[in-house]
Image: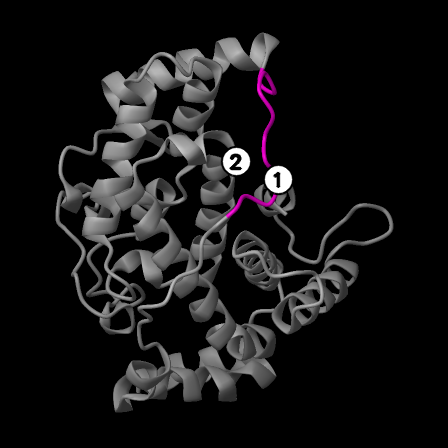
Amino acid sequence: MIRISSVGRDVRALGSSAVPRALYEGSKKVGGHAALFRTTSKSTPLRPCLPIPPHAVSGLAAATTEDDAHLIITEGLLAFGKRLSIDAAEDWIRDPLTGQVWPTTEWWKIDIRTDNRLSDVKWTWELGRHRDLVVLARAHHLSPDDPVALDELTRLLTLWFEANPLERSIHWYSNLEIALRLIAWDQILGLVGSALPQPVIGQLELHVAQARRHILIDLPYTVSSMKNNHLLGDTLGIQIAEQMAGRGPDSYPRVVANRLWEKQLARHMGPDGSMIEDSLSYHRFV
């Protein structure tokens, strides 16, 4: 009875999106996701959406960048106020709260919701947004003759690709997290793209291609049941991936994603600056 009542509460909370959510969860069980989220071996040379000119980072921002980069290199990446070091590939998928490693399997087989889950996945996802990797790229942009920041960036990206095969880790679970990572990767390319080793660039090209495909495939689900900041993030991620791959503004995915983004933004934000999600942190995020 507890299980039935729980399902009933979920259905009432989800409303009209309960049906697509149920179908989506069912697809994970019967092999639908395995067919949809097949991996690609095709990649496209990348270019940053907005190349960053020399000396673009200056003044107080430059000093802050150098300080932050030093902490990243000596103490680790920052997540919710704590520094966490990445010494091996599996540290990218390690849960800081328990010390255990999330499974390296197809993402739809990983439990992040029930009481049996490993932990709160947001700790691991926070590292996966790669914001500190952008700081390292900025640091090398400021001091291109000093290889320390670039070496650390290269090391971290190499371990990242090792720990997160296409569609096979906790970092492939959330479209929004994938989109946020695309934003970071675009900045890294704009800052130090020409300085990164070719093997890293090759992996980046492959992962951007898969990220684009992943979010596009999942877009109908997002539209049907996640008309909030997730829809904004997903559609922005598609636009960035398309532009990074050199596709023009008239490409069909970019046109569709842009229209959905504009429609959701108009719905999301009120004329007075308020937002449909009653959360100050979400308001800042959006």
What residue sits 49% from the left and 30% below the top?
A: 191
Q: Is residue 27 left or right of residue 247?
A: left
Q: Say if 211 sits above or below 252 in the image.
A: above
Instruction: Say what secondary structure mark 1 lies in.
Output: loop
**What colouring does the structure picture have?**
one colour
Q: Secondary structure at mark 2?
A: helix
Amino acid type, mark 1: Leu
For image coordinates 22% across by 62% down, the residue present is 117
Vertically, is 23 above or below 286?
A: below
The image quarter in which residue 32 lies = bottom left
Cα separation, mark 2 vs mark 1, equals 6 Å
Above or below residue 151? Residue 271 is below
- Read off the residue under disc 1: 50
Residue 122 can be seen in this image: no
Residue located beneath label 2 in the image: 190
* The N terminus, quarter of image: bottom left
Residue 10: horizontal and vertical position, in percent?
46, 78
- Left or right of 48 in this view: 173: left
Report x, y in % for residue 199. Answer: 26, 45
Residue bounds of the magenta highlight = 47-57
